[in-house]
Image (spheres, rainbow, N blue to C red):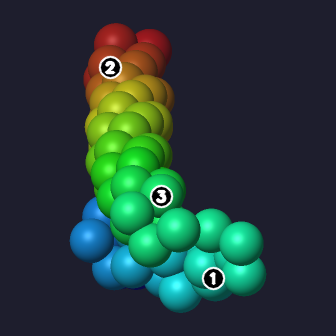
Amino acid sequence: MAKNSKKLTLDPAKFAAAVLGGNEQRSDEENKVYIKRQLTLYLESELLAQDFNNLEESAFDMAKSQKREEVLSKIIEHRYH
């Protein structure tokens, strides 16, 4: 995870690897089934982290834009009043 100006982002590959770390093979599970389950879990985890990062980026950009608008409004208000 990286933190930059209150923006939280996930490293998708590291996140997915961490998720897999807690997903042990079941005693009655064949290797092929376990590998397929691991691959599915890895891919879904990576995509979820990417979706999170995209959402975080959008929210961060929107907050910056909103703050910029507030500052601009105050400048205009001060100048013309």
How many angstroms separate mark 1 from mark 2 (CA)? 60 Å
Circles 2 and 3: CB atoms closer than 8 Å: no
* Nearest to the observer: residue 40 or residue 56: 40
* Nearest to the observer: residue 70 or residue 12: 12
**Quadrant of the image occupied by residue 36:** bottom left
> How far across and down, in percent of the image, does residue 65 sit?
33, 30
Relative to 75, 20 lies left or right: right
Q: Quadrant of the C terminus?
A: top left
What amino acid type should be assigned to the residue bearing mark 2? Ile
What amino acid type should be assigned to the residue bearing mark 3? Val
Q: Quadrant of the N terminus?
A: bottom left
> How far across and down, in percent of the image, does residue 10 sit?
38, 67
Give me the residue at 71% from left, 72% from top.
28
* Nearest to the observer: residue 23 or residue 74: 23
**Quadrant of the image occupied by residue 57:** top left
Give me the residue at 27% from left, 71% from top.
13
SS under mark 1: loop
Query: Residue 33: which numbered mark, if any?
Result: 3
Q: Which residue is mark 1?
A: 24
| Marked residue nearer the N-terminal end (2 or 3) | 3
Circles 1 and 3: CB atoms closer than 8 Å: no
How many angstroms separate mark 1 from mark 3 (CA)? 12 Å
Q: Which residue is mark 2?
A: 76
Please say whether residue 55 is visible from this viewpoint.
yes
